[in-house]
């Protein structure tokens, strides 16, 4: 399973959830995750799952790439190094199945030599995995659905999995994708994040136990590189008297912003600031309300645990989070605040409002992706498979 990294933890966390589901199925494959080292080191893995780590890249505002940590290595040199690591891992591991997240050719085409090798070898099935919303339709047509990517899907991939429910957002229709992609595509349903508690709960137990009794309002900003405004507004808001506010700043938030938020919170006894947690699901399970940006995994977590959530999505330079948040708001599953309207007073008002019973998210939209995917893998590999209790049949 390949995750290109660069921004946040969404790609690797999706693949880790799928790896866990496969290990718990009757297939029980060995799973190798290919990811950037700083991401892979932050994940709790079940037995049978390991990582090949790549040196980290950073995506720039102009669309280019630069090494995240290495100072005297060029972009081209780092891409070449990553490409050779990936190819070597494939030669030795010889997978039956490769699941590639989001980019058909990988970052800057780094997967191309590996895809050619696997095609010649002829023993590996390939799947491209996509989140529900990529970008706005114009951006998808201009960038993701480029000629090179479409040809790669046609030539190398056996299937395209969409980790979502088309009643929320159907990328096949919304992006008017070509027939050669549509015929390979299947919606899996969203990925229920509750099973992650099996590995995360024990490690997070001391943290959760040390939280005050009473209600918890949890603020999540993903990796945190552009989450400073939301985190700061949260620690400046006024909480109900029986509520403790917990904000997780994320490892990519600039140090100066993180320090400023911590100083803001120090004078307010109701707030706790955490720099990073390996897996937020225990905190989400404990929380009564969630205030968060609108990344795929964070939204899946709030919906999986059926929490009242206020989504303050990123709207620039990409509108992915804004599109997702609006669709879920229209279904009555989340509340949405445009970042242009973000103020401590707006958060105070939402936290004090009577929101009624929690949203019945799992009965409103399809959250059976992690029970379907093992059967879809077995179908691709023509492998023996037995549904375990709770497994769902293949989608039509």
Image (spheres, rainbow, N blue to C red):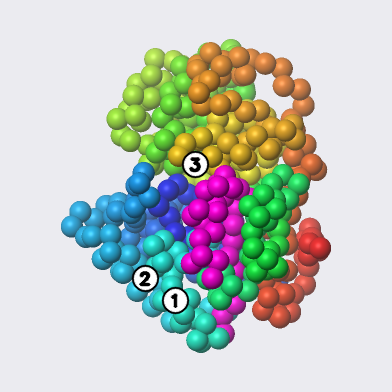
391 vs 373, left or right, is right
Picture quarter with the C terminus: bottom right
Label 3 sits on a secondary structure element that is loop
Locate residue 337 relative to residue 259 in the image: left or right: right
Q: Label 3 to label 1, Cα distance in Å? A: 29 Å
Judge whether residue 63 is colored magenta. no
Q: Decide: few, some or many residues near mark 2? Use Cα within 10 Å; few <14, some 14-19, many ≥20.
A: many
Question: Would you say 271 lies left or right of 36 here?
Answer: right
Q: Position of residue 154 (x, y in %)?
A: 59, 72
Look at the picture and state if 5 lies above or below 296.
Answer: below
Position above or below: 162 against 32: above
Mark with earlier residue (3, 1): 1
Position of residue 304 relative to residue 286, above or below, is below
Residue 191, compared with residue 323, is above or below; it is below
Could you say whether the residue bearing mark 2 is in a helix, strand or loop? Answer: helix
Q: In which quarter of the view is residue 80 placed?
A: bottom left
| x and y percentages locating residue 218 in the rendered image | 55, 30
| Residue range highlighted in magenta | 123-151
- What mark, if any, has residue 114 been given in the picture? 1
- The residue that disc 2 covers is 83
Q: Nearer the viewer, mark 3 or mark 1?
A: 3
Specify which label sits upstream in the sequence, 2 or 3. Answer: 2
Contact, CB < 8 Å: mark 1 with mark 2? yes
- The numbered disc on residue 236 is none
Q: Which residue is mark 3?
A: 318
- Give the mark, 1 or 2, whose residue is nearer the N terminus: 2
Taking the magenta stretch, the answer to whether it contains residue 137 is yes
What is the x, y in percent for residue 224? 42, 38
Question: Camera-side residue: 283 or 100?
Answer: 100
Q: Residue at x 55, y 54 (%)?
A: 141
């Amino acid at each position: 399973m390949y995750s290109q990294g660069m921004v946040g933890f969404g790609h690797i966390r999706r693949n880790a959830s799928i790896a866990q589901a496969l290990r718990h199925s009757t297939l029980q494959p060995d799973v190798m995750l290919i990811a950037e080292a700083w991401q892979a080191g932050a994940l709790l893995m079940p037995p049978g799952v390991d990582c090949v780590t790549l040196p980290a890249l950073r995506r720039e505002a102009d669309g280019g790439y630069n090494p995240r940590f290495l100072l005297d290595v060029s972009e081209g040199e780092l891409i070449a190094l990553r490409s050779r690591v990936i190819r070597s891992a494939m030669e030795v591991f010889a997978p039956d199945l490769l699941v590639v997240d989001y980019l058909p050719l990988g970052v800057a085409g780094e997967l191309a030599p590996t895809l050619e090798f696997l095609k010649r070898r002829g023993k590996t099935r390939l799947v491209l995995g996509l989140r529900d919303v990529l970008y706005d339709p114009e951006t998808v047509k201009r960038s993701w659905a480029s000629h090179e990517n479409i040809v790669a899907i046609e030539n190398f991939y056996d299937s395209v999995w969409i980790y979502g429910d088309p009643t929320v957002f159907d990328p096949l229709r919304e992006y008017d994708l070509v027939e050669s992609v549509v015929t390979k595509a299947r919606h899996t349903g969203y990925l229920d994040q509750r099973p992650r508690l099996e590995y995360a709960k024990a490690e997070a137990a001391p943290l959760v136990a040390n939280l005050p009794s009473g209600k918890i309002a949890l603020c999540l900003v993903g990796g945190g590189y552009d989450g400073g405004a939301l985190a700061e507004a949260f620690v400046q808001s006024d909480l109900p008297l029986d509520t403790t506010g917990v904000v997780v700043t994320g490892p990519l938030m600039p140090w100066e912003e993180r320090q400023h938020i911590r100083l803001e919170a120090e004078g307010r006894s109701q707030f706790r600031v955490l720099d990073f947690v390996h897996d937020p699901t225990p905190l989400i399970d404990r929380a009564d309300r969630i205030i968060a940006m609108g990344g795929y995994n964070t939204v899946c977590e709030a919906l999986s645990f059926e929490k009242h959530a206020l989504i303050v999505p990123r709207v620039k330079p990409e509108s992915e989070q804004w599109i997702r948040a609006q669709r879920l708001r229209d279904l009555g599953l989340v509340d949405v605040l445009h970042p242009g309207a973000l103020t401590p007073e707006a958060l105070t008002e939402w936290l004090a409002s009577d929101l009624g019973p929690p949203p019945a998210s799992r009965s409103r939209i399809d959250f059976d992706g992690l029970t379907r995917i093992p059967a879809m893998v077995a179908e691709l590999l023509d492998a023996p498979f037995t549904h375990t209790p709770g497994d769902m049949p293949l989608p039509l």
